[in-house]
Image (cartoon, rainbow, N blue to C red):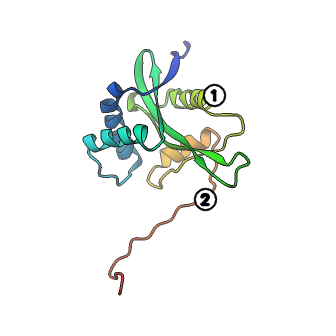
Amino acid sequence: MGASPQLDIRPCAAADLDLLARMNRELIEDEGHRNPMTLPELKERFERFLSHEGWSVDVVIEAGEIAGFATHRYEPDNAEPSGMRVHLRQFYIVRSKRRSGIGQRALELLVRTRFKEGDRIFLEVIQTNPGGKAFWSRTGFAPYGTIMERVVRGAGRRP
């Protein structure tokens, strides 16, 4: 078996945003998320992430092509000695490159180049994404809590 192609990570550029919006739409579909955002809305959200909301968006490059992306930032957490934790909001590898080991390699490169020793990384995996749960378990993540929701039906706020 040959060597794996070289992986790199770089901050996204404005020219990447249309492609990232398409990848984000695929991520939403793949995980079964109910997010209804259109491609222009997803692109606008990436622009907001970068300009106003403090997110970092990195693209994963394999063999000279964008093969995925990660959206992350440091957030306050008073339970951490440093007072901060890493929120990994989105992590996506293009469909055609999955099951090749690139996801694990890209995650390890992201961790090694973007985060510090001792950082606690958290993420959410929705129930409709069992493949995501399996991936994150394989890469060393463990469940910490469960977010539950309920939609109110047949009743409303009463004055």
- Residue in view at x 35 percent, y 28 percent: 14
- Residue in view at x 34 percent, y 82 percent: 155
Q: Which amino acid does label 2 sit on?
A: Gly
The residue sitting at the bottom extreme is 159
- Residue in view at x 61 percent, y 50 percent: 76
Say the numbered circle drawn on residue 145. 2
Q: What residue type is labelled 1?
A: Arg
Q: Where is residue 65 in the image (x, y as percent from the top left)?
A: 40, 19
Element marked by disc 1: helix
Element marked by disc 2: loop
How far apart are the alpha carbons under marks 2 and 1? Answer: 25 Å
- Which quadrant holds residue 73? top right
The residue sitting at the top extreme is 2
Q: Are marks 2 and 1 in contact (CB under 8 Å)?
A: no
Residue 126 appears left or right of 46: right
Residue 36 appears left or right of 91: left
Residue nearest the viewer, comparing 22 with 29 = 22
Residue nearest the viewer, comparing 67 with 97 = 67
Residue 81 appears left or right of 11: right
Q: Where is residue 112 in the image (x, y as percent from the top left)?
A: 63, 28
Q: Where is residue 40 in the image (x, y as percent from the top left)?
A: 25, 40
Q: Name the residue under label 1.
A: 112
Q: Where is residue 39 in the image (x, y as percent from the top left)?
A: 27, 40
Residue 155, compared with residue 118, is above or below; it is: below
